Amino acid sequence: MIPEIGHFALIIALCLALLLTGVPIWGAWRRNVAAMSLAPGLAVGMLVFVTISFACLATAFLQDDFSVKVVASNSNSLLPPIYKFSALWGNHEGSLLLWALILSVWTASVAMLSPQLPLLVLSRVLGVMGAVGVGFLSFSLLTSNPFERLLPGIPADGNDLNPLLQDPGLIIHPPLLYMGYVGFSVAFAFAIAALLGGRLDASWARWSRPWTNVAWAFLSLGIMLGSWWAYYELGWGGWWFWDPVENASFMPWLAGTALLHSLAATEKRGLFKSWTVLLAIFAFSLSLLGTFLVRSGVLTSVHAFATDPARGMFILVFLALVVGGSLTLYALRAPAVSSRVSFDWISRESLLLVNNVAFLVASLTVLFGTLFPLIMDALGAGKYSVGPPYFNAVFVPLMALLIPFMGIGPLSRWKRDSAARWRSELAIPAAAALLCGLTLPLLHAPYNPWVALAVLLGGWLVLGLARDIWWRVRGAASLRQGLRRLTPSYWGMVLAHVGFAACVIGVVATSQYSIEHDLKMGPGDSEALSGYEFRFKEVASVRGPNYVADEARFEVWQDGERVALLAPQKRRYLASGQVMTEAAIDAGLFRDLYVAMGEPIGDRGDWAMRLHYKPMVRWMWLGAIFMAVGGFTTVFDRRYRRQRSGARAATARGAQYAG
Amino acid sequence: MNLLRLPVCLMALLFAASVSAVIETYEFSSPELEQRYQDLSGELRCPKCQNQNIADSNAPIAKDLRKLLYQQLEEGASDAEIRDYMVARYGEFVRYRPSFSGATIILWLAPALLLLAAALVVVAVLRGRAGRGGPELSAEEQRRLQELVTRAETEENAERHS
Amino acid sequence: MPARLKLFLPLALFALLALFLFRGLSLDPRELPSALIDRPLPEFSLPRLGEEQRVSRADVTGRPALLNVWATWCVSCRVEHPFLRQLAERGVPIYGVNYKDDDVAAQRWLDELGDPYLLNIADRQGSFGLDLGVYGAPETYLVDAGGVIRYRHVGVVDERVWQDTLQPLYEELAAAEESR
């Protein structure tokens, strides 16, 4: 019964989404205030019914209702309850429902948190989001109904959740990632609403900025968790594989990063209006394209869902409608003549353009590299693979080119600045960064020039920011007062830029310094790796809730001191019989020690073991967390709060506006 | 129906097979060879798998290719010889680092061309913008503007701390 | 209105992309054609299955034929086997490559299920398979009279695969051979 309620709620949600698309946009066109005023209610209604549907599916999972097909294929009665819950989105049908739920959350949030928006704009924005909702809800209902029953012939127990997905990181990774992906639909909806209204002024940028920052922050966290999960769960010690599915989440992030910066110029200076609208469309299109790539099977990936060409066709048609439609609207409505606003070569505007160039080229390169095998195949030109060596070779120089400009950005002035001022402001940070780059890598033998370059670039970003903060607070009565004077937007930017610097240093240091050693070891053996001695003590059998495992026990010694106990496991899951490696990691700010267990060798108790020494690998995830916190921080800016306090007046204005 | 289901089952199997880590315990005659083994096994694609290199894949063919790679390295083959050997048998498909020849030249040049095109657009935009707009402010006007900005900031702060 | 036209550029690029994506839906990214198409069959010198006599490239060339890579550990090979026997009865020459297998088990398989092969190459280490670019059994190669590989099919050969792809190619090669 419960699954049928869920199915029915989903159908009602689709009906509400259809109304949300039709009524407010019609109302906006006819200037019908009654029709427009329905939009927030419909948005909240859509959320309520998608939530009911989601809760019903969650109940089916938690109650082991194996008559429901997705539950039978992806869960098992032995599974711990938390994984029964997260198994909901460990499959195509359930994750699509999560997509729809998160879209409704964003839609209802816009409806409820934007009383300052003129009704005309709000109704168009919600209408566009409703249209996206129609696409995904009908996709779910028509091709991937999560409530499909297995009748008759209910299996006694479920197939189990893939052991790889039985992990705390994978409980929150998909929701965060989707919060980011789907969150770009808000910026997209604002952009389309602005095009529909024909008023491409700075206001749409101001309204959509906080939403975009939050979506971007969620996406950063989601990508970071995925990378971290791959690192500790796959047992390879890798953290980024440039797999199509990873690229599918990375491309919107790159486009979103360009969008954040372009929105700043549009809001503050009324510049690049058409360009920013295009970026908003681009970022969300890449989210949709990612969904297509992951679920259609046009590219091979380790992470893809079980694919089906019929589903691929549905998303492609939807993609063509949404992206094709919005780009047509763009071509017809975007101002063809650029604004009269002027700025100098040496100005913050040009630095933001440099950012946009770098991130646009980066996202297009990732897009082209990801689709290249498909393009060649479609042209009948043969089968090709494009992998990490290619992406690293083009990505690293691009980012290295960007960072020198990125260091100047925060302290540059709008409209007109002077190179002489930049020189005098940044001479000390530049010299200090150079010193850091030259000396800090000496702490880790052998001296590595690439790490030196990374420290130089990262130091340039951080020290430039420090100089800027100092310059901004020095006039204040006390340091505390001075720091308090800085706005949340500014702090958000500082955190994000510092996070980026940490990422750069972490990525380069871990790539250059990491040592991997695969070898045969028996209990009693020991192996030295970069000053650490790994002593293999014993192997024991352990039992988990739904698996049995062999567990190797290691002591790690350094300079006569025991620094870590590591216990990697080789698990066999009872329901599916799948064997899985569980790596053991001793994490640290400056280095990780990592042991993974392979196969037993011979009959004398030897095992194949992988030992890793991974310096500074945490820095890139910490950096991503900094970036995300930065993105969230900007929302607390006074500018947006003031919008809210002035809400009542604005609502009153909205009614007039609508007339 | 069965035919349609087959690829799905296969995928599930492949995914299952890839769950546990692949650890080979070859003993190399020098650390340089071990490093080259790690690099090459990381950039050669397993022909049968779902987008995995031969280092990470549990498929039998990946195991054979790892062994072959180890033997060839120990026999003193160069990186280029090993790559050519693999490409002659499995096609360009096995290279995660596409060669710089024929159709893949466009792949390698694309980022640079994109960057160049974008840079040209930016220069065009900047040329159009620089010096456009209203007349310059005089020194006196600049000073007054600065004053107004300072006053606005002070007021904002007062409002914030009140 | 060139300024307005410029704004259509993103739409045009997207349309192109969508075309490729549409084409991609009907392609199988996992299908991998042999790198040896239109190249000569690699040289080899391996024992004949069940015997010590060695066979080489010359023993399996000279007329258009199928070269079937199989093994007793390969589940799909068992599915394919009856159809291969049918083909052999229709007079299609089939040579076997017994790939990474045990000779005794392979001989038992042929005794129990019937032997469609003219002869079987015992590729115990898989070295010939490696030279052929085999990445999993079963695979079936179509080799012409001159010993040049014309086509490879990965997976089970059944009536449909035979009629749709292999038979037309095979008959073309056979006709060319007769007219010579």
Image (cartoon, coloured by chain):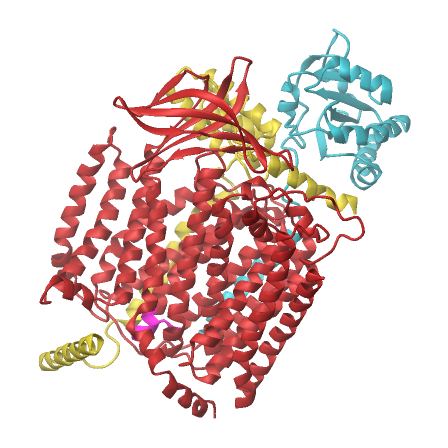
Instruction: Give, as a single range, the part of the protein colored magenta.
Output: A264-273
Above or below, C9 against A395 in this view is below
User: Horizontally, is C176 left or right of A626 in the view?
Assistant: right
Mark yes or no: residue C44 visible: yes
What percent of the width, then of the height, locates residue A129?
53, 71
User: Horizontally, is C141 left or right of B21 in the view?
Assistant: right
Q: Which chain is red?
A: A
Q: Nearest the camera: A272 or A94?
A: A94
What percent of the width, then of the height, locates residue C85?
87, 27
User: Horizontally, is A367 left or right of A622 in the view?
Assistant: right
Residue that lies at the very extreme toward the top in this rendered image: C52
Q: Is residue A506 magenta?
A: no
> The N terminus of chain A is located in which quarter?
bottom right
* Quarter of image, res A318: bottom right
What percent of the width, then of the height, locates residue A441?
22, 36
Q: Which chain is yellow?
A: B
Number of marks in picture: 0
Above or below, A181 against A47 in this view is above
Above or below, A581 against A173 in this view is above
What percent of the width, then of the height, locates residue A69?
70, 52
- Residue at x 9% of width, y 81% of height: B140
* Colour chosen for chain C: cyan
Mark yes or no: residue A379 visible: no
Q: Which secondary structure class fits the magenta region best?
A: helix
Q: Is residue A268 magenta?
A: yes
Q: Nearest the camera: A157 or A340?
A: A157
Above or below, A530 against A525 in this view is below
User: Horizontally, is A169 left or right of A140 in the view?
Assistant: left
Residue that lies at the very extreme toward the right in this rendered image: C89
- Residue at x 43% of width, y 92% of height: A656
